[in-house]
Image (spheres, grey):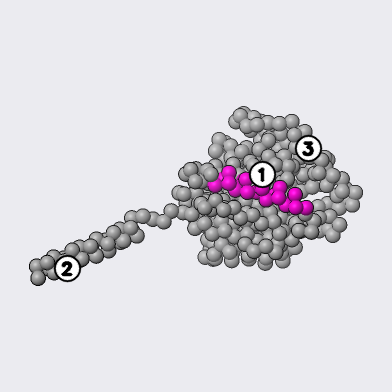
Amino acid sequence: MIDAKRGTAVVLIVLLSVGLFSCAKRVETPKEPEITMVIHGGAGTILKENMTPERERAYTEKLTEALQMGLEILKNDGSSLDAVEAAIRVLEDSPLFNAGKGAVFTAQGKNELDASIMDGTTLNAGAVASVTTIKNPISAARAVMEDSKHVLLVGRGAELFAAGQGLDIVDPEYFFEQTRWDQLLKIKESEQSSLERSGAIQMRFGTVGALALDRKGNLAAGTSTGGLTNKRHGRVGDSPIVGAGTYANNATCAVSGTGQGEYFMRNLVAYDVSALMEYQGMNLDDAVEKVIQEKLTELGGLGGVIALDKFGNVAMSFNTEGMYRGWIKEDGEAQVLLYGDEDE
Ligand code: ASP
């Protein structure tokens, strides 16, 4: 009898403490944000039939390397800004993409680079435009954000600032890539600007972008580009324009775009995604679909965006044949896609 009572008491105590423990666990251990990296390497006429297996592999490998570079930083409790900058530097240093080494040529045969970065925690942002000697424009954009009172520096002023910050400065020749030069000649031959829709010219927007969510739940976004082939000297696109090509806000999402910059600028594409979430309570997927598949498409603009929200949800949308894109989470399994008909 006594033993039975004692047994009941023990069971009760065990049940109670399990109950308390599970309560305590729910209340005291908030779910950690799901660290996530998302990148793009440009949208456009990216079709399987135009690709060789070697090129396919080269793009996949470089995008994977950039994702892993960012993830490593996030795994070590690094910030989303560090992850975005590091991932973009990998793509800027590769001739495969239209950013940094591999940037396209202006009509005058020069490379003029643009980049921006935004911190979703503080809503601070930094950008550079029309620079010709900064090896990694994304790092210069970050320096503008963190070490100047300004948001956007252009041309010579941006280059002097970057040099003063100890960033790598190169001879403009560094950016020369034969394939990009040939693309310029081809466009010139056909007397078409890639600003126009053209059946003859393949539309390729090789701009790069990265988004990250770190363990603290902070979002960041960055974009870097050489702009459009055959652009006018001095033309600046959406990539260094906060709200057009890049946007990040912890309360909503991080966004980076690629495509016909003039359309992205006039319609503040990146900010529009965030605004639909903020003011209309839309979820990430719906906001991205509305902005790209409805608004941008109805206006006749070509391109796409990648987006990431504070929960680690990823959305990607484009109205071109393909978009180099990928994402990675804690498990380290990089997902990289190139074409339009691949499932996400
Ligand atoms: N959006 C870029 C620009 O217009 C081009 C690109 O996405 O490749 O400068």
Q: Position of residue 208 (x, y in %)?
A: 67, 48
Where 222 sits versus 310, above or below?
above
| Amino acid residing under circle 1 | Leu
User: On screen, 189 above or below 111?
Assistant: below
Q: Secondary structure at mark 1?
A: helix
List the residue tagged with mark 2: 8
Q: Is residue 107 above or below residue 308?
A: above
Depth check: 282 or 318 in front?
A: 318
Q: What residue appears at the point 33 percent right and 55 percent down from the top-left corner?
A: 28
The magenta stretch is 52-71
Q: Position of residue 57 (x, y in %)?
A: 71, 50
Q: On the image, numbered disc 1 is attached to which residue?
A: 91
User: Which residue lies most toward the left here?
Assistant: 2
Q: Is residue 57 magenta?
A: yes
Q: Quadrant of residue 177?
A: top right
Report, in whole angstroms, how far the alpha carbon at label 3 lies from the one at label 1.
16 Å
Q: Which residue occupies 61% across, 55% down?
A: 335
Quarter of the figure that contains the N terminus: bottom left
Which residue is found at the position 76% from the left and 58% from the top?
48
Residue 38, x across and y down, in percent = 59, 52
Viewer-nearest of discs 1 and 2: 2
Residue located 81% across and 58% down the image: 197
Q: Which residue is mark 3?
A: 176
Looking at this view, name the residue that lies furthest to the bottom. Answer: 1
Asked if the residue at label 1 sits under 8 Å from ligand 1, the reply is no
Q: Quadrant of residue 16?
A: bottom left
Q: Secondary structure at mark 2?
A: helix
Inter-mark Cα distance, 2 to 3? 81 Å
